[in-house]
Amino acid sequence: MIAFFIKRLGQALVVMIVISLIAFSIQDNLGDPLRELVGQSVSEAERQALRDEMGLNDPFLVQYWRFLKRAVKGDLGNSYFFKRPALEVIMEKLPATVELVMGATLIILLFSIPIGVYCAINPRNWFTRLMMGTSIIGISIPVFLTAILLIYLFSIELGWFPSFGRGETIVIFGGWHTGLLTSDGLMHLVLPSVALSSIMLPLFIRLIRSEMMEVLEQEYIRFAWAKGLTRRRIWFLHALKNTLLPVITVGGVQIGTMIAYTILTETVFQWPGMGFLFLEAVNRVDTPLIIAYLIVVGLIFVVTNTLVDLIYGLVNPTVKLTGGEA
Amino acid sequence: MPILEVNNLEVRFPMREGELIAIRDISFSIDRGERLGIVGESGAGKSVAAFAILRLVGRPGYISGGQILFEGNDLASLSPEQLRQFRGNQITMIFQDPMMTLNPVLTIGTQMIECLQTHKGMRRREARELAVEKLRSVAIPSPEARINQYPHELSGGMRQRVVIAIALLTDPEIIIADEPTTALDVTIQAEIMELLLELCEKHQVALILITHDLGVVSEITQRAIVMYAGRIVEEGPTRSIIEQARHPYTQGLINALPERTRPGQRLNQIPGSMPTLMQIPPGCAFHPRCEHVTDVCRTQVPDYTRFDHSRVACHWVAVQEQTSV
Ligand SMILES: Nc1ncnc2c1ncn2[C@@H]1O[C@H](COP(=O)(O)OP(=O)(O)OP(=O)(O)O)[C@@H](O)[C@H]1O
Ligand SMILES: [Mg+2]
């Protein structure tokens, strides 16, 4: 167990350093931050003085080291646009994104397992054929298109769900603004969550179905039938447990990937989260904010993967949580 | 009355090229506490027959004919739910490869207790105690600890002992063991076989032992069936089959036994190989490999020639019988 954590910590550190290096080196390639800070009227000499003062003329490694030292303390610099610490700006938007991802994850879990299992058990059924067909379509339609279609249908035509913003939020512990505790907030969450899950859900249905079909062919399932167990027990215990193990691993990675999709979803739905903020930051060449975003997302990625590995190790008896297999 | 009676059982597999008949005209019966061997080369249809008895033919196969009577009752007349309660209760199975038979993500205990819960309506604690006791009876050391372990923590031999314990758990009338030692280390094969024999004798359980090893059959069983290309070619008391096999195929199998071969000599294998189900020759399926082949063998499927306690499907044997009478 301890070896497992040390190993994961080491891996996480390497990943974070790589991300920070990438994030930091973007700085030089994203336009001139000075143009954003000061107006056109400032003379070239003054600009140079300001550059020197900000350390923008120092060698790359010196700048990176300075950046790292501050980053470890949680200081990722001030946002050029908001004139406040970038990390603070990002963290304010974190709850919106996390809740959006949670909503989508919940939808995926709630639908992919029963549908995937059903399709595996009844491979020739009309519903299975329908699901297999529509899931291919679902996977191939881009998220923003799904989002626009959803807005058109459920917001404009039917008027069931709002399509804009987070709705009413309330503050819970630690300044976390949540929309999960008000009905208005929940209504606002529906369409963005559905849109965000629109690629992963069909992907998971197909994944669970194919894993389950493979498991159902195994000798131990045949033995379970020969033991005279009920269908329920064979499908939902013997087969499902073996099916979900590999799905957990893939699922963890996919949750990370979903954060990337939030940029599109949040933009279409004007969802005030990190992804929306990130796109704005890119437009404004707000480098500190971009870097802060990349680092926070990287951190989330590392943390979720570690958690997933941990859960996988706990539910899979053939994996011991030593540094080796896990 | 025999405990199990199988009459003219036939199993087919619908395939793109047409229907394969995996086993045909399989008839035999087994008494309470009796031990019956089923011998045959790979692909002869032994496993298909075994699963068909439990009405568990793998898709797309189906039972296309015949009758299975357990204590005189036709299994075909049972509802799916009654059939489920019958399986793993009155007749249990031991599979070939213990590495694949046990569910890797459930503990030994879970996989044992569930049988007692479904079939005997036992409570968890009670079932657990019985499971521990059964593990002890198959000579698993420290069963109280083992019962909480997962299959991968046990060796192959230990796992097969667990499977045997599961097979005995519900006090079945019949155990069907489909090549229970083939996948094991040679050194522990005899050990497992001996254990199985001992337990069957002790509990008066009938055993249907499927194997391609005539040697094992002669040690364990009282009666034997020889299968070839989906059909029974010879049936009789094990001793008479070993000592005076009548069917040329059975004779070939016996000549191929290592004991029958002088040291340094090559095994006396029967020339040729068993046809696949798609290319079963007309007439007697064995005729292309048979040294006594005549014209009638090439065109007519042989009927059974009956003797006191045995029967043989062979034209050559039939002709000999007629001329000797
Ligand atoms: N699921 C299936 N689909 C199609 N054909 C099958 C299937 N299962 C069995 N068969 C056919 O039935 C034949 C007999 O198979 P079976 O498994 O009973 O042989 P066996 O005598 O048990 O051989 P082995 O000694 O290798 O276990 C096979 O050769 C195959 O052609
Ligand atoms: Mg077999």
Image: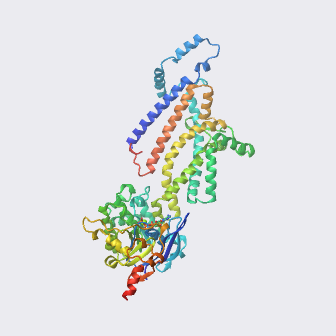
Nearer-the-camera pick, B79 or B274: B274
Give me the residue at 47% from left, 63% from top.
Answer: A222
Q: Toward which corner of the image does residue B161 lie, by quadrant?
A: bottom left
Q: Is residue A91 visible?
A: yes
Residue at the farthest right position: A157
Q: Residue furthest left?
A: B263
Q: Note whether B70 is above or below A151 in the view shown.
A: below
- Which image quarter holds the C terminus of chain A? top left
Q: Nearer the viewer, residue B187 or B93?
A: B187
Which residue sits at x=58%, y=57%? Answer: A118
Q: Would residue A317 be found to the left or right of residue B58 on screen?
A: left
Give percent across and percent down for residue B13.
52, 67
Q: Quadrant of ligand 2?
A: bottom left
| Res A78 visible | no
> Hey, which residue is sitting farthest bottom in the picture?
B325
Q: How many marks?
A: 0
> x and y percent of residue A247 in the render?
51, 49
